[in-house]
Image: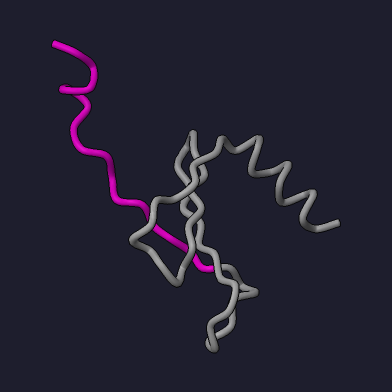
Amino acid sequence: MNAEATRGPAPALVWAKSSYSGAEGGQCVEVATTRVTVHVRDSKDTTRAALAVNPTAWTAFVHFAAL
């Protein structure tokens, strides 16, 4: 038996839209976090694959973007 079979299904991700996203559309992103991964997707096209990065990389990106 492998660990994958005993773990069960992954819980659904809970997505949060950026507070900078307006109701009129435009450049919008959503993020969903787990203990080991930060998922990022385009809120206008949620059918596309999300980008998944580790929390350290996400923190570095947010710090750089805030400069």
Residue at the farthest top position = 1
Q: Determine whether 40 is above or below 2 in the image.
A: below
Left of 52 or right of it: where is 14? Answer: left
Which quadrant would residue 4 be assigned to in this image? top left
Look at 53% across and 82% down and name the residue there.
25
* Quarter that holds the C terminus: bottom right
Which quadrant would residue 46 be assigned to in this image? bottom left
Left of 53 or right of it: where is 8? Answer: left
Residue at the farthest right position = 67
Question: How many marks on residues?
Answer: 0
47 or 8: which is nearer to us? 47
Left of 62 or right of it: where is 42? Answer: left
Q: Where is residue 53 in the image (x, y as percent from the top left)?
A: 55, 39
Q: Determine whether 59 is above or below 40 in the image.
A: above
14 or 23: which is nearer to us? 23
Q: Position of residue 57 (x, y in %)?
A: 65, 37
Look at 17% across and 22% down and name the residue there.
6
Q: What stretch is highlighted in magenta?
A: 1-17
